[in-house]
């Protein structure tokens, strides 16, 4: 019943034994120990589990691990390069785009996808694209400010 | 992770650019790096080798006698370790903060759908799920109580047969002046009944934890909690253990807001770990389970009569409150008591008759939720204030200013307000803001089929535990053997930022930057008892204790350095980042060297602080006093909502929001604003969209697709202004900011909708359907606004 698959996560290849019905979120957290990706609902309604697949944001709780085979998966653990924070992460730290932080990995990964697609977004556009990522703590104001500042920090470039 | 050693778990901040820690500066949160990189380990993130998954069989029925539990098929599922029931519990099997009325595992009857019937331990999640589905409960259904007024009637089904007061958990009565008789002396009276709904906390991290039993008999529980020290006692008593054998370790919760004030997974996990054969156990409620079994903001029914003299001077208040506390006390009596204390808002009202009931029902459990009873009554009193202003033909800001308490005045329960009070400043700042000054222009420029209104509300929020239950903290600060400053936090940081603020306080006193600081999160074995993370008390109470501990350590360091340098005294020495300098000569000694001249016992300084309490004798019963009335420290606020209503759909949209708050001096503006913004967003969800549908005790909205909390595109532009009045008893002049902002949004929005449409919606949330319905029946009720 179990099946061996290979997943490429943050540039590393992991061979892992899974059940075909296991979600990518479950495999990341329970099998690979990558607990930076959070679970807030397991039903595609909160965005806490957002990761990048070939550069696009996906809800890992809605995706079967087997469907992620052959894709480049990036999780929050793989965003900063060698100890240096990614500019998006820096902005969230500086501007206080987080409180409890449980939504933060998902929000940061979504922000990455937003800014890759639209390097100089308007605030309205960020709000709209971030609407699938729930945050119960911050009221979003500083979250949006952090994304806008990251856009500036990245020089409006991809 | 099984070899997890919690004794060395300290967080240091050397990876962040080291920053000066000044009071009043927007120092970035020191938990941000860990959280933004995914490294922070929440309770939900603990796994480990040879892990056992624990799950709960829930009642699924609101009220029924439990005749038996058949788990014969469940235990046969491959991978099942144990199935446990109440028979496996050797302690009291009861939990609760004031009244211990909640079973860990049901032994007699189910009192709400989320009651825990059996605990299953399994090798993996699949087996766990299969076994839970196979457990059969033999229930004999009982008639239920689903409404608080109905619960008080004679002949209502009883939720607790052994409660002498029937379904009445607590009744509170307060009379000041001539009470209801003052009715006759009023020139104007307004009257209304308000109904506010249950609200779900909806923290992103559902209830989670991890536990193990060590070979030496110690039970270690890592959990998402606001109350580690109280949890330890509760777990020990319920399971019949020596409390010193229970250790609660509290990482940062992924949100809590009151919903983790008290036991959720803790006792169940403890029980599981006692029966898992030494294996670590993990429990993590899914979202639906969190909805069904977690606590809620109390649904409330509130009857109000407010009377005034012709010039707008408030004279009389009559209030009756019915709070639906669900099947267990939890903190229901305390919530009701705060509601009574704040029923008259932040105003002088010389004659009041306040009565309230917290009523047992078979609905979901009512418990602590940011605002804690104050949110409900603020919604009511701030709406009747607007109704009164309209009847008097008075400006709503002026009416509030006219009656606003100042220091030395009495609140509506007769308590003399002795703390700093910036209510007048809040209201004046609001009235000078463009959103208020230009309200008429803004309203008149509404587009076709749109109507606009501007509404305001004022609020106060008592903080701390009240006059009886000691509100204390014990801070501990250490000069580590490598010369760092380590702060042991006794109070949980569930996101509000107090851990970071603690470092700011200690760092500021000891002259250190963030790079020299270390942090230990609450842990009953390592940090000292300091009460709950609740009641807007965290930084006030713990901060005061921390100042004492940090000052003690500072004196010790300076004295030792002065002795070494043969200086004339510590006044010649200064702490600078990483070192102590002898000012006259400029010579320095690094802390990592200086510490060699300390005995271990000298490296640690502790300080105890107990918050001041009200000394007023206002003639309430000892029981009500025990439940926390009256408070002595209050935060204040005034807010404004600019709302646009769609005439065709009834949908109300908040376009702009202004909050002016007096929470004393602000220690960190960034963290302060986060607290205000977050409180407003939760308050706006409560006002407009968060509708917990409960039908005969069953929650129908058990996820985020049906229970709608605000998203990034729902929250309007927020202006937040701090009116910083120095509070002499606060650490550096601070008062609590945790709850005040949650109280204003509902009444401000309701007042704005009434301003826009000329009709009032008395039931929250103000959904499009309700607004449309009220609008349609406008003609029938025009006099009632
Ligand atoms: S956990 Fe995937 S969307 Fe909520
Ligand atoms: S910071 Fe807590 S949910 Fe977003």
Image (cartoon, coloured by chain):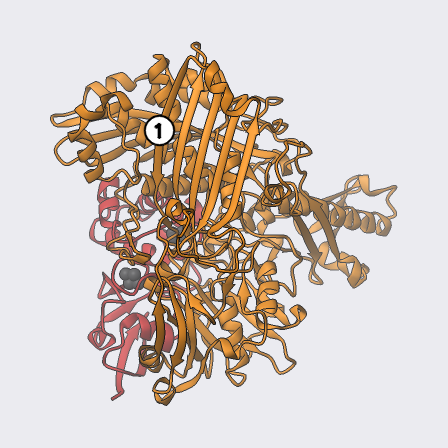
Q: Position of residue B698 (x, y in %)?
A: 31, 59
Q: Looking at the picture, how far across and down is residue B162, in whole percent?
A: 52, 60
Q: Residue at x 39, y 47 (%)?
A: B148
Tell me the orange chain. Answer: B
- Seen in the picture, residue B676 relative to B778 is either above or below; the reply is below
* Pick the front one: B423 or B404: B404
Q: Quadrant of the C terminus of chain B?
A: top left
Q: Position of residue B371 (x, y in %)?
A: 46, 41
Taking the image as shown, residue B616 lies to the left or right of residue A100, namely right
Per the image, label 1 sits on a secondary structure element best described as strand
Label 1 lies in what chain? Answer: B
Q: Residue at x 42, y 10 (%)?
A: B310
- Which residue position holds label 1? B192
Q: Nearer the viewer, residue B3 or B466?
A: B466
Q: Is residue A116 above or below residue B180?
A: below
Q: Quadrant of residue A80?
A: bottom left
Question: Taking the image as drawn, is residue A128 in sight?
Answer: yes
Q: Position of residue B85 (x, y in %)?
A: 46, 77
Tell which chain the image draws in red: A
Work out whether residue B448 or residue B779 is closer to the camera in this orientation and state it: B779
Give the residue drawn at x 72%, y 55%. B591
Q: Residue B21: in sight, yes or no?
A: no
Quarter of the image where one finds residue B715:
top left
């Amino acid at each position: 019943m179990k099946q061996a698959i290979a997943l490429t996560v943050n540039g590393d290849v992991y061979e892992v034994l899974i059940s075909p019905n296991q979600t990518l979120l479950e495999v990341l957290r329970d099998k690979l120990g990558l607990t930076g990706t959070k679970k807030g609902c397991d039903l595609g309604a909160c965005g806490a589990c957002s990761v990048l697949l070939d550069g696009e944001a996906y809800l890992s709780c809605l995706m079967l691990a087997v469907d992620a085979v052959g894709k480049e998966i990036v999780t929050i653990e793989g965003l900063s390069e060698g100890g240096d924070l990614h500019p998006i992460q820096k902005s969230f730290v500086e501007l206080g785009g987080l409180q409890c932080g449980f939504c933060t990995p998902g929000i940061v990964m979504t922000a990455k996808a937003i800014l890759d697609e639209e390097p100089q977004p308007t605030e309205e556009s960020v709000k709209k694209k971030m609407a699938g990522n729930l945050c119960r703590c911050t009221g979003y104001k500083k979250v949006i400010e952090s994304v806008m500042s990251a856009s500036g920090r990245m020089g409006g470039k991809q | 992770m099984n070899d997890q050693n919690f004794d060395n778990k300290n967080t240091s901040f050397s990876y962040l650019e080291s920053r000066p820690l000044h009071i009043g500066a927007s120092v970035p949160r020191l938990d941000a790096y860990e959280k933004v990189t995914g490294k922070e380990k929440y309770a939900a993130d603990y796994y480990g080798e040879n892990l056992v998954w624990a799950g709960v069989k829930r009642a699924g029925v609101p009220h029924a006698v439990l005749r038996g539990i058949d788990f014969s098929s469940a235990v046969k599922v491959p991978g099942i370790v144990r199935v446990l029931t109440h028979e496996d519990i050797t302690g009291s099997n009861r939990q609760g903060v004031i009244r211990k009325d909640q079973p860990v595992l049901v032994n007699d009857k189910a009192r709400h759908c989320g009651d825990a019937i059996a605990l299953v331990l399994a090798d993996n999640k699949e087996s766990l799920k299969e076994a839970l589905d196979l457990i059969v409960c033999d229930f004999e259904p009982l008639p239920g109580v689903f409404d608080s007024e109905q619960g008080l009637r004679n002949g209502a089904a009883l939720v607790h047969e052994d409660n002498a007061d029937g379904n009445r958990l607590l009744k509170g009565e307060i009379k000041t002046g001539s009470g209801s008789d003052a009715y006759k002396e009023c020139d104007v009276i307004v009257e209304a009944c308000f109904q506010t709904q249950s609200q779900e906390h909806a923290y992103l991290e559902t209830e989670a934890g991890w536990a193990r039993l060590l070979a030496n008999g110690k039970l270690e529980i890592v959990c998402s909690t606001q109350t580690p020290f109280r949890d330890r006692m509760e777990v020990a008593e319920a399971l019949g253990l020596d409390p010193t054998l229970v250790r609660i370790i509290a990482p940062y919760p992924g949100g809590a807001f009151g919903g983790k004030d008290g036991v959720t997974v803790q006792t169940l996990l403890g029980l599981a770990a006692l029966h898992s054969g030494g294996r670590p156990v993990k429990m993590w409620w899914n979202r639906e389970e969190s909805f069904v079994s977690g606590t809620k903001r109390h649904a409330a029914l509130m009857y109000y009569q407010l009377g005034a003299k012709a010039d707008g001077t408030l004279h009389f208040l009559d209030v009756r409150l019915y709070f639906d506390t669900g099947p267990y006390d939890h903190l229901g009596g305390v919530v009701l008591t705060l509601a009574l204390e704040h029923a008259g808002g932040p105003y002088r009202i010389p004659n009041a008759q306040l009565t309230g009931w917290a009523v047992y029902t078979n609905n979901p459990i009512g418990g602590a939720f940011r605002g804690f009873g104050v949110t409900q009554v603020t919604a009511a009193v701030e709406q009747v204030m607007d109704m009164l202003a309209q009847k008097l033909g008075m400006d709503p800001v002026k009416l509030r200013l006219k009656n606003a308490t100042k220091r030395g005045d009495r609140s509506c329960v007769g308590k003399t307000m002795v703390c700093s009070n910036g209510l007048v400043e809040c209201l004046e700042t609001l009235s000078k803001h463009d959103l208020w000054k230009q309200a008429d222009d803004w309203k008149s420029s509404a587009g076709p089929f749109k109507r606009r209104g501007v509404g305001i509300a004022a609020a106060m929020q008592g903080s701390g535990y009240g006059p009886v239950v000691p509100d204390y903290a014990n801070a501990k600060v250490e000069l580590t053997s490598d010369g760092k400053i380590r702060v042991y936090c006794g109070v949980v940081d569930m996101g509000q930022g107090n851990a970071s603020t603690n470092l700011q306080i200690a760092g500021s006193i000891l002259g250190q930057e963030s790079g020299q600081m270390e942090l230990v999160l609450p842990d009953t074995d390592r940090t000292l008892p300091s009460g709950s993370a609740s009641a807007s008390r965290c930084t006030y109470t713990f901060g005061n204790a921390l100042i004492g501990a940090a000052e003690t350590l500072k004196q010790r360091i300076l004295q030792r350095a002065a002795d070494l340098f043969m200086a004339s005294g510590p006044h010649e020495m200064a702490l600078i980042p990483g070192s102590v300098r002898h000012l006259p000569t400029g010579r320095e000694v690094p802390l990592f060297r200086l510490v060699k001249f300390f005995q271990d016992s000298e490296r640690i300084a502790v300080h105890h602080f107990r918050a001041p309490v009200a000394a007023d004798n206002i003639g309430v019963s000892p029981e009500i006093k025990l439940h926390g009335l009256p408070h002595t420290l209050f935060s204040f606020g005034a807010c404004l909502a600019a709302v646009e209503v769609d005439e065709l759909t009834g949908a109300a949209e908040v376009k702009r929001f202004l909050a002016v708050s007096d929470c004393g001096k602000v220690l960190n503006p960034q963290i302060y604003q986060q607290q205000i913004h977050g409180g407003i967003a939760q308050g706006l969800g409560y006002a407009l969209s968060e509708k917990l549908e409960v039908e005969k005790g069953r929650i129908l909205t058990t996820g985020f697709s049906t229970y709608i909390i605000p998203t990034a595109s729902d929250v309007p532009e927020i202006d937040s202004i701090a009116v910083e009045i120095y509070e002499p008893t606060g650490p550096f002049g601070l008062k609590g900011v945790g709850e005040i902002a949650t109280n204003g949004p509902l009444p401000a929005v309701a007042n704005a909708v009434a301003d826009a449409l000329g009709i009032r919606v008395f039931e929250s949330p103000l959904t499009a359907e309700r607004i449309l319905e009220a609008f349609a029946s406008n003609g029938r009720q025009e006099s009632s606004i």
